[in-house]
Amino acid sequence: MILDLCSSSRAHTPNMTPIIPTANNPASATKLRFARRFLRSLSKMSKTRPSCPSSICVKKRSEGLKMAAYWCMARSVGSRRAWSRAILMKLSRGRQQHPHHHNFSMKRKIRRPTWLGKTKKKQKKKRNITCSSSSYDDEDEEEIMKRQTEKLREVVPGGKLMDICSLLEETAHFVTCLADQVHVMQTIAHRYS
Amino acid sequence: MSSRRSRSRQSSGSRNITDDQIHDLVSKLQQLLPEIRNTHSDKVSAAKVLQETCNYIRSLHREVDDLSERLSELLATTDTAQAAIIRNLLMQ
């Protein structure tokens, strides 16, 4: 069944066992690991916080689910990638940041990472995007490239400290994993609705 | 000395990064983007690929948001039977 979660976008051999990932298909192995991890935290969530239909509960749990999804993906990738390390660091730091840890967090102003979405800066960014597409022609190619690179640094976790090559490599890997994450979540949601 | 300089300057040109390398990486990135995957790489500028990448990442985040909400609602409407199903999924 877990194999099902990974099968539709990638072909698989019928005799492949669902638990053991194949060595020649590491991307799919990550997806499998993510699927198992995420299902496990889903089941944990439904056990510890049993059904509560109020909208506050749903909202809170959906936030928790989202964090769990990012966390599970980063854990499945492990620490060999800069972006997953960045996510793991941010999320574990976020965990320590409950109100009673306030004096710790005051010293270092920690901004909500942009890849978690819903920042206050969103408005400003949107304007930037429209600006960039309208003035596309009369600007130096290199200048545009530079600006787009900066934007990419914003959306890729840990992207701020990378040189351009690592940034592009990490971005490619991050995009693949994020798409896998969405696909697994879609499949799970589809099965239960 | 050059390595010290590359730390302060991260733009292309430092650490002997060639245009070819960047071109290769950008076209690899292009293959991952559903919007422009099938367009010939000569017709898409590198900046355009990066812009599309940003848009794609943002749309994926939005999907994660929506799906988390949906899953949360599903967990709310269904009860222990649901948990049992999830556990079953894990066993298989």
Image (cartoon, rainbow, N blue to C red):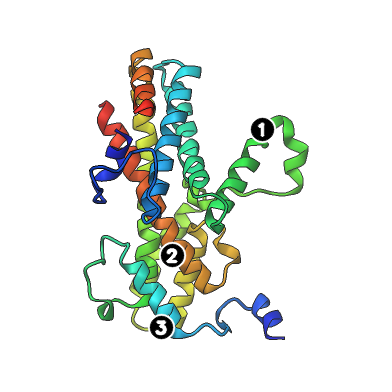
Amino acid type, callout 2:
Asn
Q: Mark 1 or mark 2: name the one nearer the start of the chain.
A: 1
- Circles 1 and 3 on the same chain: yes
> Could you tell me which chain the residue with mark 1 belongs to?
A
Q: Mark 3 or mark 2: name the one nearer the start of the chain.
A: 2
Residue in the foreground of this view, choosing between A64 and B15: B15
Check disc 2: other Cα within 10 Å, few if <14, some if 14-19, many if 20+. few
Mark 3 and mark 2: Cα distance apart in space: 17 Å
- Which residue is pictured at 26% across the width and 33% down the height? A190
Number of numbered tags placed on the structure image? 3
Q: Which residue is mark 3?
A: A141
Place of residue A102 in the rendered image (x, y in percent of width and height, measured from the top left): 73, 36
Mark 1 and mark 3: Cα distance apart in space: 45 Å
Place of residue A90 in the rendered image (x, y in percent of width and height, measured from the top left): 60, 47
- Circles 1 and 2 on the same chain: yes
Q: Mark 1 or mark 3: name the one nearer the start of the chain.
A: 1
State the residue lying farthest toward the front: A15
State the image quarter where residue B38 is shown.
bottom left
Residue A128 is tagged as 2
Amino acid type, callout 3:
Glu
Q: Which residue is mark 1?
A: A98
